[in-house]
């Protein structure tokens, strides 16, 4: 198990380095980052200033290495627009994104797993058809449109929930639903498929032959094995949500990283943009690494050897 | 189902029954699955054909131009199913904030969605399939490198990177297409890799190798036809994915630029007036939903029909 | 010796695409306390489904019916699902064929052993643990206490099967059904496991049904034998009766197939029964074995063939031929 973890860690580090390189070079897509930062009304000397201050006049390799070195120490540069340290802002806004992602994935799992289990117990029944229909509809619904629909009905017409901001936990309800529902079909199908396969295995027959109650057979024996791939998927989807929450955060004005990214893009705040992509990618790499470990840990055949 | 009467002929097939066999689906349920898959193809295909038709014949379907025919005195006309004094049968779906006919913009928007979806799917398909088949066929280091590339790509949040790149390079139809195409190849790579792996070890591939066929020829003639159905399924999924991404990008203002009638853009334009004129948001959203649904149904249907045992 | 299990006219029907399949057609047998009944037959004759039918573990599409299905005086045909789940693993336990996949890979064997007892008895965790260790030692597993914390994948096939046996004994059942318990194991281990089962059965005075296709196994452990063919029992008797005086042509054919060192001539063809098993879909007329039988004639092809008494008491066979004729046939064939 330790060897397994170390190997995965090695891969994760390599991937992280590559991502950092790509993220770093992103700002050169605009041609001259100094010009982009300075804005349209800047004079030549303004541009030169910026170039010097941000080190854009150095050779690229030096720039990358110093950027990387700083990043590893927690210094992600300074925001040209906000005039503060990038890391400060990012880590102030990160919790909101995490909360949003967390509640969204929780909502998705609470909906998807029971649906998947019930659909597997009675395959091709009405419940199964309903579950699959929900899945098909869910995958076709654009998230931002769904968010607007939710706002229209729950927020405006019936005034049930607040629409913007993060003042209370109720603010997170609609955004969580709008962000999480997209994951539900995938999780549900995986749960269903996994349960169907597991329910046909020999050890389930043994469990029944021991006279165990149906609930015990279903949850202690079947779901425990079927859920293993679902855990991985859920972790990965959580990672995707962190990166993909930009649309939802923007609609609901939630002060998270996504919204911050949106604002930075509007303002051409390059160091901020770079840093956000880097931070989110690193978090994703971390999450998938932990998911791999957890996956292995859940299966005693890998854990105990 | 009819009984087979007195069967004392020795040509009657052996029907032994182990408990495993008793559990297998009967031919009835296997057929039911195929029919279900067919429903998917029929409904999905029909809707897709409809939207495709809308896109192709867009200029001939209405009398208006989606961008140039502005009539500010006629703006915010509700669609025909509302009541009210402003309803005008000349504009069956009403008009938008600039007095442009909504139906016209809708059908022209289909062109944008379909074009972007298709083109991005092609680009990502070529990239992903090449990587995936190479990884599956050659294995070893090639496989390691491809896996590493896939992991790197997966680690970067697509929509964020797309937004950032588009904001830096500039947003136009073709930039959006290329950015999306260069970003969403991962599922192609993953799926093509695993199916190639499955097919690669089968006997007819070994036979072709023994006969001395070149690697390229083997890939083209032995492997590709057998992974083609998986390729089609992934292609439909990724086309839907691309369409959704473009809609999101346009909704945020960094995709297709106004005054083009991208459906995502139309939703964005309408959201400010959503409370009073919900159709501005409802109609293009419903169109997007229908298009994605159709593509997904088609893809699922193809998968069910070509490989029923793989049905989730 | 009173009967712990009495079965009369047990049937299993399964709807399939081409009609209604009858894999088990009207079985009659009984098992006494402390007695081993071996059900012998080739693959697909319905013996596994019979065991599942007794435990009420048939796949959902299958239906079971019986005129009589009595376990220790209780009518199982009237038992509710709840009652059956109370009986399973408790009064009647089952051991399956594939030890490699019959244990849940996610839990320790201690957990799975104790769970069998805790379900049916209100004992403490410690008491359950003690019983598990006791039984593990009984089945010949050393270091039982530390084995409790092991996972199935850490044990070999033979060990896993011993664990399965121990697990079936956790509640002290009156009746054990073993469905080909040694088929998936090494030949060297087979003998040990069979011996183990026989000892445990005698020690705990349980009734046992042992299902197998291996006549060698039958010879070793059976008190009584039921020979199955195509969903029906064709011959029943004590082991001695069936082995020394096989009366039904199918039984004779089976015994002829076994090469006997010293007796079977080198180079002479090994016996086999030509033909294939008939389809069990729809209604079959006449004797199921008639097509492959050496001695069949037109009379065999129609009507229901009932049991006839054999040479001794308690020995019955399902054939229209006279028992002396059968004996003569066998003598001719074996010579």
Image: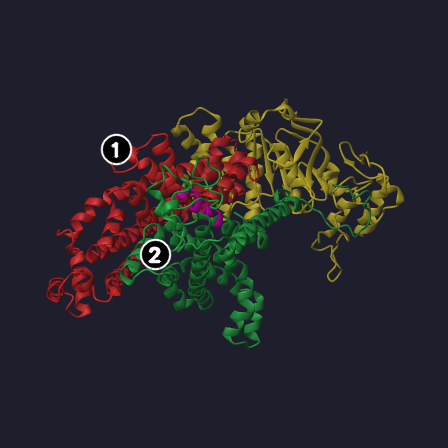
Chain colours: A red, B green, C yellow
> Both on one chain, marks 1 and 2?
no
Q: Residue, x 15% and y 58% (percent of image)? A: A70
Report the residue that reaches farthest toward the front.
B73
Q: Is residue A173 above or below residue B17?
A: above
The answer to whether any part of residue C152 appears in the image is: no
Determine the main secondary structure of the stretch shown in magenta: helix
Q: Going by the image, does A176 lie left or right of C70? A: left
Q: Where's the N terminus of chain B, which quadrant?
A: top right
The answer to which of B273 and B234 lies nearer the viewer is B273
Tag nearer the camera, 1 or 2:
2
- Judged from the image, the secondary structure of the residue bearing numbered disc 2 is loop
Q: Going by the image, does C244 lie left or right of C86? A: right
- Judged from the image, the secondary structure of the residue bearing numbered disc 1 is loop
| Chain to which mark 1 belongs | A
Q: Which residues are magenta?
A: B280-291
Q: Going by the image, does A265 lie left or right of C270? A: left
The answer to which of A265 and A126 lies nearer the viewer is A265
Real-space CA distance between mark 1 and mark 2, rounded to the nearest whole angstrom: 36 Å
The residue that mark 1 highlights is A168
The residue that mark 2 highlights is B257
Q: Residue, x 66% and y 44% (percent of image)? A: B28
């Amino acid at each position: 198990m330790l060897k397994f973890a170390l190997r995965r860690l090695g891969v994760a580090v390599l991937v992280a380095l590559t991502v950092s390189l790509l993220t770093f070079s992103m700002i050169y897509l605009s041609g001259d980052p100094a010009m982009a930062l300075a804005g349209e009304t800047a004079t030549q000397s303004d541009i030169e200033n910026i170039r010097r201050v941000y080190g854009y006049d150095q050779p690229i390799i030096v720039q990358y290495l110093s950027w990387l070195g700083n990043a590893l120490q927690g210094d992600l540069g300074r925001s040209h627009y906000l005039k503060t340290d990038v890391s400060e802002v990012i880590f102030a806004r990160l919790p909101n994104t995490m909360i949003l992602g967390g509640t969204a994935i929780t909502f998705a799992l609470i909906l998807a797993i029971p649906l998947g289990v019930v659909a597997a117990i009675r395959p091709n029944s009405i419940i199964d058809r309903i579950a699959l229909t929900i899945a098909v509809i869910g995958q076709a619904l654009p998230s931002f449109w769904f968010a607007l629909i939710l706002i229209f009905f729950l927020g405006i017409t019936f005034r049930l929930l607040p629409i913007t901001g993060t003042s209370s936990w109720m603010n997170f309800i609609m955004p969580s639903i709008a962000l999480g529902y997209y994951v539900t079909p995938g999780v549900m199908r995986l749960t269903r498929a996994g349960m169907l396969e597991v329910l046909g295995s020999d050890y389930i027959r043994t469990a029944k032959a021991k006279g165990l109650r149906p609930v015990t057979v279903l949850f202690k024996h079947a779901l425990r094995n079927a859920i293993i791939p679902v855990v991985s998927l859920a972790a990965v989807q959580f990672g995707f949500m962190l990166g993909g929450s930009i649309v939802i955060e923007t609609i609901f004005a939630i002060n998270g990283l996504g919204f911050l990214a949106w604002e930075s893009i509007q303002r051409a705040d390059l160091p901020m943009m770079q840093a956000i992509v880097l931070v989110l990618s690193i978090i994703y790499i971390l999450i998938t690494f932990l998911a791999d470990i957890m996956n292995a840990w859940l299966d005693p055949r890998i854990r105990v050897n | 189902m009819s009984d087979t009467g007195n069967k004392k002929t020795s040509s009657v097939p052996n029907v032994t029954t182990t408990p495993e066999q008793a559990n297998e689906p009967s031919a009835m349920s296997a057929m039911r699955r195929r029919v279900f898959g067919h429903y998917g193809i029929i409904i999905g295909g029909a809707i897709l054909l409809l939207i495709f038709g809308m896109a192709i014949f867009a200029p001939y379907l209405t009398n208006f131009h989606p961008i140039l025919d502005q009539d500010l005195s006629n703006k915010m006309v509700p669609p025909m199913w509302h009541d009210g004094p402003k309803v005008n049968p000349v504009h069956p779906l009403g008009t938008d904030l600039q007095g442009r006919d909504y139906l016209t913009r809708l059908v022209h928007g289909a062109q944008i969605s379909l074009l972007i979806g298709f083109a991005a799917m092609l680009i990502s398909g070529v990239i992903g399939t090449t990587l995936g088949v190479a990884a599956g066929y050659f294995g070893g280091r090639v496989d390691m490198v491809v896996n590493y590339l896939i992991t790197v790509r997966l680690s970067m949040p697509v929509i964020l990177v797309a937004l950032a790149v588009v904001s830096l390079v500039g947003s136009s139809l073709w930039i959006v297409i290329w950015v999306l195409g260069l970003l969403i190849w991962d599922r192609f790579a993953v799926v093509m890799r695993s199916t190639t792996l499955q097919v690669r070890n089968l006997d007819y591939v070994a036979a072709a190798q023994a006969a001395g066929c070149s690697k390229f020829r083997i890939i083209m003639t032995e492997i590709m036809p057998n992974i083609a159905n998986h390729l089609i399924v992934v292609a439909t999924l990724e086309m839907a994915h691309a369409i959704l991404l473009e809609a999101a990008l346009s909704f945020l203002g960094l995709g297709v630029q106004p005054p083009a009638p991208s459906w995502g853009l139309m939703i964005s334009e309408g959201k400010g007036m959503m409370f009073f004129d919900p159709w501005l948001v409802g109609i293009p959203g419903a169109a997007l939903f229908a298009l994605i649904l159709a593509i997904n149904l088609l893809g699922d249907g193809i998968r069910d029909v070509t490989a029923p045992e793989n049905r989730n | 010796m009173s009967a712990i299990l009495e079965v009369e006219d047990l049937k299993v029907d399964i709807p399939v695409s081409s009609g209604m399949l009858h894999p088990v057609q009207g079985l009659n047998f009984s098992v006494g306390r402390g007695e081993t009944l071996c059900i012998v037959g080739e693959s697909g004759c319905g013996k596994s489904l019979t065991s599942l039918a007794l435990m009420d573990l048939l796949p959902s599409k299958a239906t079971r019916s019986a005129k009589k299905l009595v376990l220790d005086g209780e009518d199982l045909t009237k038992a509710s699902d709840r009652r059956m789940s109370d009986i399973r693993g408790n009064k009647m336990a089952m051991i399956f064929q594939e030890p490699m996949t019959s244990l849940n890979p996610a839990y320790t064997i201690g957990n799975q052993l104790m769970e069998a007892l805790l379900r049916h008895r209100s004992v403490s965790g410690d008491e359950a643990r003690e019983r598990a260790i006791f039984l593990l030692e009984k089945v010949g597993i050393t270091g039982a206490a530390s084995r409790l914390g092991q996972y199935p994948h850490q044990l070999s096939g033979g060990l896993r099967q011993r664990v399965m046996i121990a697990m079936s004994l956790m509640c002290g059942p009156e009746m054990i059904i073993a469905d080909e318990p040694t088929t998936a194991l090494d030949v060297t281990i087979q003998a040990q496991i069979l011996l183990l089962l026989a000892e445990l059965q005698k020690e705990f005075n349980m009734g046992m049904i042992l299902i197998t296709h291996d006549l060698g196994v039958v010879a070793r452990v059976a008190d009584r034998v039921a020979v199955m063919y195509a969903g029906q029992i064709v011959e029943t008797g004590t082991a001695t009766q069936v082995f020394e005086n096989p009366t039904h042509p199918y039984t004779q054919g089976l015994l002829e197939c076994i090469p006997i060192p010293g007796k079977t001539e080198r180079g002479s063809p090994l016996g086999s029964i030509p033909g294939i098993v008939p389809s069990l879909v729809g209604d079959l007329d006449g004797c199921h074995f008639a097509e492959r039988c050496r001695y069949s004639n037109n009379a065999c092809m129609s009507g229901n063939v009932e049991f006839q008494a054999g040479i001794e008491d308690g020995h019955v066979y399902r054939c229209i031929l006279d028992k002396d004729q059968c004996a003569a046939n066998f003598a001719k064939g074996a010579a």
